[in-house]
Image: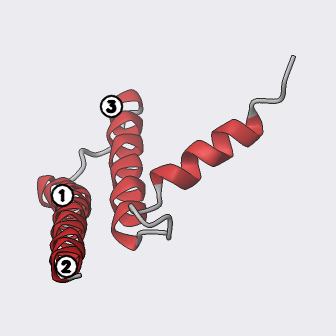
Amino acid sequence: MTNPIPKILEWLHKLASDENGSPSSKRVIGILSSLALIFVLIYSSLHETKPVNDTIVNAVALLAFGCLGLSSVDKFTAIKKQIKEATSNKAEDVSENTQN
């Protein structure tokens, strides 16, 4: 049986990386705040503690979804930029070939 830990670590690295392969702080903060929110909500529902303040829950949820949403916007704008660069390079190549 193979060791699954390297595959899990690789998956976590890809999860926290942007489209260029570098670590994305927005993704890391979004994932960590989502996990913290899930942990606190589960803990408070299983144990008889005083209820979590709604304002704090909403703030952490907005932070998590905001960071993950901004990370998604960055991904799509980078793809759009790559397409624009590729088409402009192709147009330059075509113009050079027609001049020769």
**Side (left or right) of 20 relative to 55:** right
Task: Name which residue lies at 19% across and 63% down.
Answer: 83
**Side (left or right) of 18 relative to 22:** left
First in sequence: mark 2 vs mark 3 = 3
Front-lying residue, 10 or 95: 95
Front-lying residue, 32 or 86: 86
Q: Position of residue 1 (x, y in %)?
A: 87, 16
First in sequence: mark 1 vs mark 3 = 3
Secondary structure under the numbered disc 3 in the rendered image = helix
Front tag of 1 and 3: 1
Crowding at mark 3 (Cα within 10 Å: few <14, some 14-19, many 20+):
few
* Three-letter code for the amino acid on which mark 2 is drawn: Glu
- Residue 92 - label: 2
Q: Mark 1 sits on what residue?
A: 69
Quarter-wise, where is residue 32 in the image? bottom left
- Residue 45 - label: 3
